[in-house]
Image: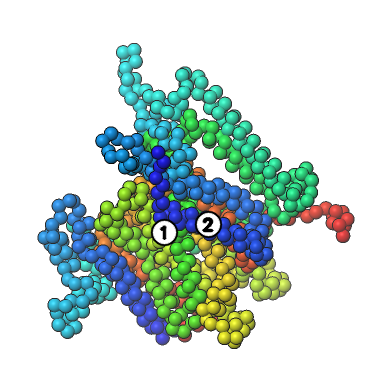
Amino acid sequence: MFSYLVRRTLYGALILLGVNLLTFFLFFTVNTPDDMARLNIGGKHITQDLIDKWKIERGYDKPLYVNDAKQGAEKFTDTIFWERSVSLFELRFGRSDAESAGDIGPEVRRRMGVSVQLALPLFTLQVFASTAFALLLVMFRHTRLDFWGVVTCVLMLSISSLIYIIAGQVMFSRLLKVAPISGYVPGWDVAKFLLLPIVLSLLARLGTEARLYRAMFLEEISKDYVRTARAKGLSETVVLFRHVLRNALLPIVTSAGAYLPYVFLGSLVFESFFGLPGLGAYVIDAITKQDFAVVRTMVFVGSLLYIATFVLIDVAYTWVDPRVRLG
Amino acid sequence: MSPKFVLLWTDATTWALILCMVVYAVAVARSPNLKASWRKVFRDAPALCSSLILGLCVLLTAADSIHYRNALPPVPGTPRGVVAYDTVTRSGLDWLLSSLIESREDTYSRPLDYLSYRRDTASINGQLQRISPRLKHGGAHLSDPDHQWAADLASRVGTGLVLGLALAVACALALFGLLARTRRAGFLETAASVWRKEGDIPWRAGLWTLVVMATLVGVTVSLMGAYHVFGTDTTGNDVLYQSLKCIRTAFVIGSLSTIATLPLAVVLGIMAGYFRGWVDEVIQYFYTVLSSVPNILLIAACVLMVQVFLDKHPDMFETGVERADVKLALLCAVLGLTGWASLCRLLRAETMKLRELDYVQAANAFGVSATRIMVRHVFPNVAHLMLIVTVLDFSSLILYEAVLSYVGVGVDPSMNSFGGMLNLARKEMSLDPMVWWSFFAAFGFMVTVVLSVNLFADGVRDAFDPRARAFRPRLPVTRKPAAQARNQG
């Protein structure tokens, strides 16, 4: 187990290195810092002096990969690539490209808290609701309930999440006035602001997940051990909850776990629609303001979380299924 | 003077794709295996019905993929032989719907209304009153709208219904005729057997879909010239026109992006599965790196780069449409280049299984080269996976476009797309009184398109992947009376 974790972590670091190279290539080679400066300063009259000043302020005034002016190891370390990469791995994110905004690090930490507030209850409810709905359909398989349940799922997954949000906001906030349209307050009062996004997000993904889980359950049900259990004279409920549910948990953990990074990264669309100052809204802001430093940082943080999640999923396997040994 | 035809990037690829589909259809007709599989697809009633809707959408997309610029009348003073062209690029669909483009109002108007949504203050008999002015085009032919409107609407709906039904009946008769010829049966006999749902292909369900579609199209067409069927948006443009234009954007994104994933996914996936060893390790590393970046961030990063590139070269494009089109093509390329990991993983696993099979081992023993084995023996046996993933991804990409447009990294704002419409609708829904028609139009069109794609994709998956069929929900079978069963036995 331990050696497995070490191996996975090392491979994860290698992957992160690749991600870093990829993003660096995208952000600095395809477009040079000069282009970024021009875009960020905006306006018609941009002089080279202004660009140089902008670059020095943000530390972009070095060669990209190789610094010919320096000697020895500094030839490679005194470059933008080295500095940016090392600081990312040390989780120092530097300042954002925007004029007024400050350091990225504290901002990320603060916003991550907000994102978790929305996403953790959402994630738990999501897994629970989808599993419950899928189990219900499986319990009544080959009946009208199952048929129309799947039809509802297909219909629900054909609707864009934007439509759920817009319709939900109009219905619950404007017409019924049961929840505020958007906003955020620190502390426990935040619950009333979180209610609507959680419910809508739940609905938006229920169709996809319930249908997927149903297929997983049905796959388990067709296996031999289920027939044995029934032959023993166990009731259908016991078979379903004791045997099938336990065994179907493994694929469910995999597919639900893939959403874990978003627990921290936040849901891009939901956060910005409901005015929650989480990481998702941060990314959208950065994209619309073309703040490359923030986008790059978020790509890095996102991949870090993603890699960590997959190690976690592997560990969760051993807990869900004692037959799995990590070695 | 003849107009100048413009071949946009996405036009060229769309037409190439349609050509490929035709070639594939011919190949299917020649191969008994493929033919049997596709027959299975159409045996599924939802798949058959949705394929009709998709067919209409493909027709609209094709019509919207012929672009031209009109020649301007010669201006005195310009040398002879030099023709100036309009800066506005139009498409075949625009030509069909030119009445909708020309009937532009000033601002919002409700669906089928003859009054503007705006209220002006006017003095009537010396009193200041808030009245809505008449629309410039919607219902402009009515002299006394208060009394004539309902009757006019009813007569137009009636004409549309009759025309639509006539079209549907014509199609049904043509179908019966064709079926009667292939089955070598009488015309009435065939019609009766279709009505009794006999035969393996659910023609009756398809005909009902056709009737619904034809009446809807008929009613819309007969109302379209005189009214704004789905109202107008803030700048007075017809919402129906916009919704129809969105279909092309959705289809281009759905098809081109999935096509763009194929080369990388297929080549790398088969190579990784076949060679294993270090090749496998390297390819796995590549797609793990790609898939460990949250998808939307990677796309946003790439699209931002495209944006900067386009901003840097503003003189590359003659018209705004060309620019928007290149942006769309690049968006598809970005979606393709960032989305190949999952298909690649799937193909790798499948190839690993296939390479151990006897026929591949035999080919190997005969000294057939690795490339040839991969092309001749492995690829045809994973092709069905490619097809399934392609159609399954199609709908999620249409949904994804909406989110990307909201985030600001989607298609060009000047191009009609469902995402753009929803984005605007969000603001309109918060107006008071509510402007709901854009939202409902976008909702209706989008759900119809995505739902049909999903149903069709499910049919394709069930037909080509036998394992998937077990999960299909079935209505309880009503048992035939015992007497009948005895008679048959």
Q: Quadrant of the C terminus of chain B?
A: bottom right
Chain for disc number 2: B
Query: Which is closer to the viewer, label 1 or label 2?
Result: 2
Residue B444 percent across, percent down from the top left: 50, 44
* Image mark count: 2
In this rendering, would A50 be left or right of A192? left
In this rendering, would B131 be left or right of B17? left
| Residue type at the position of mark 1 | Cys
Residue B436, placed above or below residue B133: below
| Residue type at the position of mark 2 | Leu
Residue A259, placed above or below residue A160: below
**What residue is rendered at 36% in x and 64% in y?**
B298
Q: Is residue A45 visible?
A: yes
Secondary structure at numbered mark 1: helix
Residue A43 percent across, percent down from the top left: 18, 51
Give the mark nearer the N terminus: 1 vs 2. Answer: 2
Residue A55 percent across, percent down from the top left: 16, 64
Q: Which mark is residue B332?
A: 1
